[in-house]
Image (cartoon, rainbow, N blue to C red):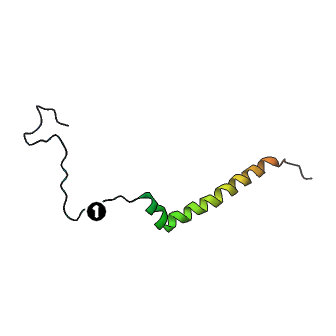
Amino acid sequence: MWTYAAAPPSAQQQLLLVTDTDVARGQQPISQLFCCNPWLVGAIIAAAIAIPIALHNSNDDDDQTATPTN
């Protein structure tokens, strides 16, 4: 940011973005990310299966009491 006194004479009040013809936006809709990326879809499906199984198995461990074996 320039102060009014320090700004060069050619300074403008707004930003002017000048591009060449070979510019591409680096954004895409979030729906395309989920629809077209098989790794992401696979990871979501794997997590949807693994997390409930892990939670169920961790609850089973709390119900068991240790019994000594002789």
Left or right, residue 16 beside residue 59: left
Q: Position of residue 10 (x, y in %)?
A: 8, 43
Residue at 44% x, 63% y: name it.
Answer: 32
Nearer the observer, 39 or 36? 36
Query: Residue 45's quadrant in the figure?
Result: bottom right
Q: How many marks?
A: 1
Read off the residue under disc 1: 24
Nearer the observer, 20 or 62? 20
Q: Position of residue 60 (x, y in %)?
A: 77, 51
Left or right, residue 38 beside residue 22: right
Residue at 55% x, 65% y: name it.
Answer: 42
Query: Residue 14's quadrant in the figure?
Result: top left
Q: Position of residue 15 (x, y in %)?
A: 19, 45
Q: Quadrant of the N terminus?
A: top left
Nearer the observer, 62 or 21? 21
Q: Amino acid at mark 1?
A: Ala
Q: Position of residue 39 (x, y in %)?
A: 51, 66
